Amino acid sequence: MGKGAKAMKETEIKGATEDFQQSLQDTENEKYFLRLYVTGITPKSTRAIQNLKKICEENLKGRYELEVIDIYQQPTLAKDEQIIATPTLIKKLPNPLRRLIGDMSDKERILVGLELKRK
């Protein structure tokens, strides 16, 4: 490989590295919009809210909005979102939309579901 080809290859690698670092920075600045559907003030609902708030504060501090919806008080919203089990977390933004069901105690599963950690 000649000097010109080698310099060109290094430039391509540097450009790809910069693109990758920029995409990581963009992800770190993204705002998350989350909706957690619960059924009243049951132990499972309360646990899901506490677990999710803790995960969000540890991993998304200042970059998330969490809306908790009690399907007993707002059944239309649950119907519109086709909620069939609770607690259900819906990640509205950033795309893609994700749904997670359970008491949010499996931190690794939640982080993967929110795309904050790879499988």
Image (tube, grey):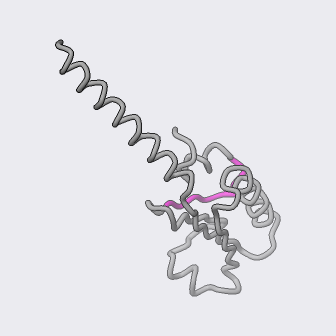
Query: Could you tell me which residue is drawn at 68 percent across and 46 percent down?
Result: 107
Q: Where is residue 46 in the image (x, y as percent from the top left)?
A: 80, 65
Tell me if residue 104 is in the magenta stretch.
yes
Instruction: Give, as a single range, the part of the protein colored magenta.
Output: 98-106
Q: How many labels does the image show?
A: 0
Q: Which of 110 and 10 is in front in this view?
A: 10
Query: Could you tell me which residue is drawn at 71 percent across and 74 percent down?
Result: 39
Residue 102's place in the image compared with 117, above or below, is below
Q: Which of 10 and 88 is in front in this view?
A: 10
Q: Position of residue 31 (x, y in %)?
A: 57, 63
Tell me if residue 112 is in the magenta stretch.
no
Within the image, what quadrant is residue 96 found in?
bottom left
Residue 61's place in the image compared with 42, above or below, is above
- Name the quadrant of the N terminus: top left
Residue 117's place in the image compared with 12, above or below, is below
The answer to whether residue 77 is left or right of residue 67 is left
Query: Could you tell me which residue is drawn at 40 percent across and 34 percent down?
Result: 17
The answer to whether residue 41 is left or right of residue 101 is right
Q: Position of residue 86 (x, y in %)?
A: 65, 67
Q: Which of 20 and 52 is in front in this view?
A: 20
Q: Position of residue 18 (x, y in %)?
A: 41, 39
Within the image, what quadrant is residue 10 found in?
top left
